[in-house]
Every structure is written in structure tokens, then in C-alpha cells.
Image (cartoon, rainbow, N blue to C red):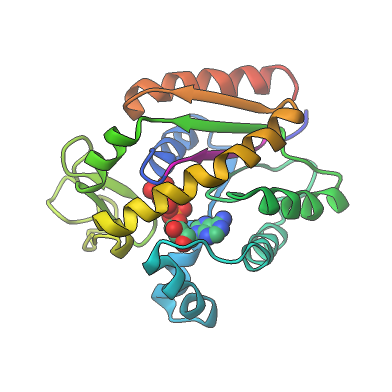
Amino acid sequence: MNPLRMIIMGAPGSGKGTLTSKLLKKLPQIHSLSSGDILRREMANGSEIGKMAKSYIERGDLLPDKFMANLIQAELEQQKWLDAKTSFLLDGFPRTGNQAIELESVLVPHNSDINMVIELDVPPEVILNRIANRWVHISGRVYNLEYNPPKVPFKDDITGEPLFKRPDDNPETFKVRLDKYFAELEPLREYYEKKGVYVKVSGETSDIIFPKLLSAVEAKVKSGL
Ligand code: ATP
Ligand code: MG
């Protein structure tokens, strides 16, 4: 059977990280990669990539397409995810039409292509409310003080390390990120709709969206891809 090679897209705060980790609990054979987590890891390490990323991220700006494509390509090839067996899920990449084209040119030499794209469709007013309550661990684990609080306040459940507030989760930067997402959504949707791999799942909370997401993915896997 062919591997699942999927993308999860959605506005910032739409629940990509939360839904991805729920999905991986059900389908642990899928590997995942989050562009935002890679960039935050590089920033925490103080690497050259991290230094470059910092100013963009703090403004809520997107990094250049080519830069992101190279970063993701390196990660995919290093992890050997482009073989005939490995199923993977990308969160946060591609997020422009040009990045989708770049990704295709990374995959083609490996006889590979994206075979499923999920758009999380969550009303912006719901998202804006949610962001104020979001705390994260450096690993990318996400908590919401109301819906999904850590067992010990402000500590990661697994490592016990402190949680922090993403600097780009303040209301001004967040608005910029949200606007940029919607500006790029249309070209991405068109690109993947033409390929017949696009699925939209709508809802206000991750609890409502998750069963829809899971059944879409399971149906896709059953179809033999
Ligand atoms: P959330 O994590 O809430 O779903 P998000 O999608 O805005 O929100 P991340 O994916 O974590 O957040 O990305 C954080 C920041 O990293 C972005 O605002 C952007 O500056 C940068 N970034 C991440 N992925 C990309 C990408 N594919 N292209 C350009 N910039 C990116
Ligand atoms: Mg994220």
C-alpha cells in the first residue's frame, strides 16, 4: 500500500498541533513535521536559521518561500521519509502557492506526491478567543488553560518543564498572522483541489473536528490511496 503523505492547513490557532497529536495517537505509523516547531527549535538553539527566523516570526511575517522549502527538504531527506513506505503529515508547510510548487519539486524525484490535504475551517472569532489561553512547551506540545490544561499549572505534562507564551501570540501579531493566512489560502486551495486531494473539515472546537478528520483519513487509507 502507498504511504499517506498529507498536509494539514488551517489558520494560526485553528488546532493543527492539537489535532495532529490526537491523530498520531490513533495512527502512530504516521510521522509528522511542523514548520513552526522546527523554527522555534532553531531559535531556542540560537542557530543561524533561528536568528534569521526570529525577526520574521516576531512580526508575524512569513519566511521566504525558498528558505522554507530548503529547510523542509533537508528535514524530509534526512529523516528518510521519502521512501516508498513512510507515511507523513506536514503541519505549517506549504502555506503559499509557491511553497506548494517547491514541495512538489522536492517530492517528484522520489516518485512521491501529496495525496491528502486537510483544511481546518474554524471561525476567526473562535480562534481569537482561544489564543489568549494558549501556552506551549518547547517540544511543540500545546495546552489551553481552559480546554486542555496541563496537569500541573504552567508545567509540561511529560517533562515537567515550564510552559511559555509564544511571543507571536500577542493580539497585534496574531491579527497579522491571521490576515496573511487568509491571503494565501485561495491559491493553495486551488492548487490542491485541481489534484483532487483537498478535504475541508469545519467546526468550532477540536473535539468536533477530530472525528471528522479521523474518518476522512481512515477512508483515504482504506481507499489504498
Ligand atoms: P499555529 O501554530 O497556531 O497553528 P501558525 O500556523 O501561525 O499557528 P506556526 O506554524 O507555528 O504558526 O508558524 C509560526 C511562524 O513561523 C509563522 O508565523 C511564520 O513566521 C513562520 N513559518 C512557519 N511555517 C512557515 C512557512 N511554511 N512559510 C513561511 N513562514 C513560516
Ligand atoms: Mg502550529
- Viewer can see residue 156: yes
Height in image: 84 above or below 74?
A: above
Q: Is residue 217 left or right of residue 160?
A: right
Would you say residue 137 is visible in this rendering? no
Magenta part of the chain: 4-11
Image quadrant of residue 65?
A: bottom right
Residue 19 colored in magenta in the image: no
The residue shown at (48%, 76%) is 50
Residue sitting nearer the eye, 12 or 24 = 12
Question: Which of these two is toward me, 157 or 63?
Answer: 63
Q: Position of residue 66 (x, y in %)?
A: 68, 65
Residue 39: where, in percent of width, then height? 48, 66
Say left or right for 181 vs 90. Answer: left
In the image, is 105 to the left or to the right of 87? right
Q: Above or below — where is 37 with respect to 104?
A: below
User: Looking at this view, is 20 or 172 the one in front?
Assistant: 172
Can you say which quadrant of the picture contains the N terminus? top right
Is 21 located above or below residue 216 in the figure?
Answer: below
**Place of residue 207 in the rendered image (x, y in percent of width and height, measured from the top left):** 33, 24
Name the residue: 71% across, 37% down: 191
* Magenta-drawn stretch, dominant element (helix, strand or loop): strand
Q: Is residue 154 left or right of residue 72?
A: left
